[in-house]
Image (spheres, coloured by chain):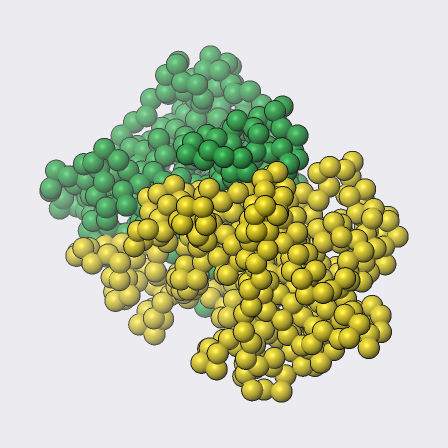
Chain colours: A yellow, B green
Amino acid sequence: MEVIKESKYDSYNSPTSVGIVTTKYFTFANPPDELILDSGVKFGPITVAYETYGKLNSSNDNAILVFHALSGDAHAAGYNSPDDLKPGWWDNMIGPNKPLDTNQYFVICSNVIGGCRGTTGPSSINPLTNKEYSISFPQVTINDMIKVQKKLVDFLGIKKLFAVIGGSMGGMQALQWIVSYPESSESAIIIATTTEHTAQQIAFNSIGRYAIISDPEWKNGNYYSTNRKPDVGLSIARMIGHITYLSEEAMHKKFGREYINTNNITNNSNNFNKNKSFKNNNDSLGYEGKPADFTKEFEVENYLQYQSESFIKRFDPNSYLYITKAIDNFNLSKDHPNLASALKNVKSKCLIISFSSDWLYPKEQSLKIVKALKINNVDTTYVNLISPYGHDAFLIDDENFKSVIKGFLKSVKTIR
Amino acid sequence: MEVIKESKYDSYNSPTSVGIVTTKYFTFANPPDELILDSGVKFGPITVAYETYGKLNSSNDNAILVFHALSGDAHAAGYNSPDDLKPGWWDNMIGPNKPLDTNQYFVICSNVIGGCRGTTGPSSINPLTNKEYSISFPQVTINDMIKVQKKLVDFLGIKKLFAVIGGSMGGMQALQWIVSYPESSESAIIIATTTEHTAQQIAFNSIGRYAIISDPEWKNGNYYSTNRKPDVGLSIARMIGHITYLSEEAMHKKFGREYINTNNITNNSNNFNKNKSFKNNNDSLGYEGKPADFTKEFEVENYLQYQSESFIKRFDPNSYLYITKAIDNFNLSKDHPNLASALKNVKSKCLIISFSSDWLYPKEQSLKIVKALKINNVDTTYVNLISPYGHDAFLIDDENFKSVIKGFLKSVKTIR
């Protein structure tokens, strides 16, 4: 995603940066007070990694809870150390005078249960066995994710949030929050998401999971004690994801049909075997007319591999399985005759945002949410933002996007 | 694709079936008269697997050459034996009184070079080594594919075809034919295709290739002497392909969010671990709250795996690498200032067809072809057929589609 980002990052000492932040940890659900998951399992202890930016005011009514997406984490803004090359994943949105203005709001972001970035997940040590849970970790749902975050919010002494906000899987959590805890947030900003995956959305995730569990290094989830992980499987999953995160237009504008090392290449099939980059992976090929490299000939292939190589360094394959399952199983209306019925208790003022070029979560899915909220007379604003960036648009620094969020938050209520 | 197909197959003794057909073989390019490939390599001998349906008339002017797509082969119509469960891949299109009416036309279809269904490809034996070529097989292009088919057409004694026709990669070959051999076909039917892949189209193919070459069973292409093939990699490639072949709408209509064994399931997250199907792949999971099966919970997952299992039985992974590379490298205007210039010598009357729900080769790509042909004053008809079936629509038995093709062929010229 960084490749697309046009603007420079705030430095940690910029006046619009939250600066250096420390990830904190909160542990709860110690036996015998375990959390009851949607599966019925009593599970604990649970440690939650979280960060906060800004200050909670004296009336405790200025807190905004940010939910991260599939590959995100608690580190949403600022820098964990002055040496960090990049700030948190939503640094363009969170900070002094930014839309989630830390001069006004107390912003919270935590890593989801099932994750691998500090919150208890399959790579965490099971205290009963002193080994990683691996796939003995219980199945978790989007609703379980917000149950854990409700405990965190309670722990921080906040009875009612000013807003919940999230994009993609973060938007699912925001939706679940206003349904499960209708009294617990003044407002909700629900971005580029859906109330339930379609068959195609399930299919994309499922192939990623298939790639992971079919990787011989997966070893039925028990790779932690080995020196290897199912990196190939996770890479494939990530590459598939990346195609869906970008619009066809953005991808083509960025990479087109460019060949790697274009200055050596005439883009003519009579010459395209002469470029040295084609030998990268297939040194054993030694005669003329040999195939070009099967996966590293085009710039777009280079990009996908670069992105997945960076991803596998920071993400646990088992967490990818659990979190994508939570996403695919999410179905807000499943115990209801229809979506409007599922949303009947919502009291939060809502802003729904879709992006014109997002084909993973197209605007029709946002409009279904808008319609169901309107049926319930929920105060709802809907914006379809024109953007060329596809689903990733919610992570891109864009003035229109930011001003819509800023304006909505101003309209919610006056805080002190 | 069979899953979507609504109509019954013709039986081999039906009056509209071409009946029992035998695949034939033609060998040429014996040293020292090898074929010069686009890479510059002299390659031979080359054996071509082909089938013909109908009879060549006395003036040799009623022949239609059918080009197959990525996973197709020479067996386009009829049955190779009375025991075959299914006819050839385009049986709804080819036969007595069908659009490619074998009472009138002599229809030819051959397997492409680089393939694995009878025509020389990476799984063929290299006569110099008595071992499979594997990835010592030379790179091939779409243009190489039609060079081979031109030799076959010459061998059959046909100076000028009545029509060339193909969808997807078959459409690329049809385009290349009318450019490379402008005098060699009265007409061309170019279906659901493009003159060059965009970055996204390359990306989908590339991830499939990455999955194959990353499968430990690939062994740098030399898996033929082992008992195993990179089936997992090829399965992943095929599953990715299948998502792109179906429209979001068709996939959702067919599978929705249905869980496997739905009669045992309440579709409620509190219950979804109770279904026995979840234990299929994860027998080691033994306590409540265990994850549902990671890849076999939804009907759409079942479909993708069923389709890929059937595919890996009939397709060579190395052929998948070579053919998708030929597709990705295809760029009709690469030696020209623009596409119109590349098409300047076209003399064939053209019918371009796109499908409304095809998001792999959207209608904009067909319109580019139409525009470039019109600039050259080529007699061109364009139809965007309304279909819910996505890219696969060109393989579906549809009356509108068939009547458009039938009507166009009637308009080309009168044959005896």
Q: Residue at x 45, y 22 (%)?
A: B86
Pick the front one: A294 or B416: A294
The quadrant the C terminus of chain A occupies is: bottom right
Q: Position of residue B165 (x, y in %)?
A: 47, 39
Pick the front one: B311 or B108: B311
Pick the front one: B342 or B154: B342
Q: Position of residue B389 (x, y in %)?
A: 60, 38
Q: Position of residue B26 (x, y in %)?
A: 25, 33
Q: Is residue B332 above or below residue A322?
A: below
Based on the displayed image, in which of its 4 quarters is residue A74 positioned?
A: bottom right
Number of numbered discs on residues: 0
| Horizontal relation, residue B23 to residue A158: left or right | left
Based on the displayed image, in which of its 4 quarters is residue A314 positioned?
A: bottom left
Q: Residue at x 39, y 13 (%)?
A: B82
| Residue placed furthest toward the right | A377
The answer to whether residue B110 shows anywhere in this view is no
Q: Residue at x 36, y 51 (%)?
A: A224
Q: Residue at x 36, y 71 (%)?
A: A262
Q: Position of residue A131 (x, y in %)?
A: 39, 49
| Horizontal relation, residue B122 to residue B177: left or right | left
The answer to whether residue A86 shows anywhere in this view is yes
| Horizontal relation, residue B371 to residue B217: left or right | right
